[in-house]
Image (spheres, helix red, strand yellow):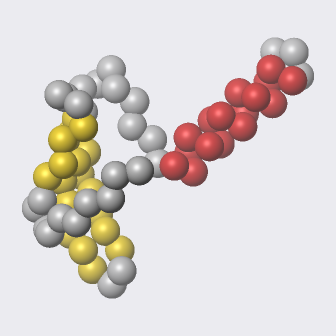
Amino acid sequence: MLLLTRREAGVVSVGSSVRVTVRSVRDGQVKFGIAAPRDVPVYRGEIRRRMQCGASQASRDGA
């Protein structure tokens, strides 16, 4: 895992097509802006886990 320190408006590039910008830092909460092509899926961690659990449950159920 790469750990970075960025200030507000700081940008991190992921690959050649994804940019993550720190929009604000306030009260222990960070807001990010993510710019990615439409064909690159971007999910919050809990949504991704839910999708993975649903897919594994469907395969166990024979779907």
Residue in view at x 23 percent, y 31 percent: 15
* Residue 21 x, y percent position in the rendering: 18, 53
On screen, residue 47 above or below 28: above
Q: At 87% from the left edge and 15% from the top edge, which residue is drawn?
A: 62
Residue 11 picture location, percent across and down: 14, 52
Which residue appears at 18% of the width and 64% of the height?
6
Farthest-out residue, bottom: 27
As drawn, which residue projects farthest toward the top? 63
Q: How many discs appear? A: 0
Residue 25 in sight: yes
User: Residue 7 occupies which quadrant of the picture?
Assistant: bottom left
Q: Please determine whether, in this image, residue 24 is positioned above or below residue 46.
A: below
Q: Is residue 58 left or right of residue 10?
A: right
- Left or right: residue 17 versus residue 47 is left
Displayed quadrant of residue 27: bottom left
Coordinates of residue 30 in the picture (x, y in percent): 31, 68
Which residue is most to the right?
Answer: 61
Q: Considering depth in this image, is 11 or 41 the residue closer to the camera? A: 11
Q: Is residue 37 left or right of residue 10?
A: right
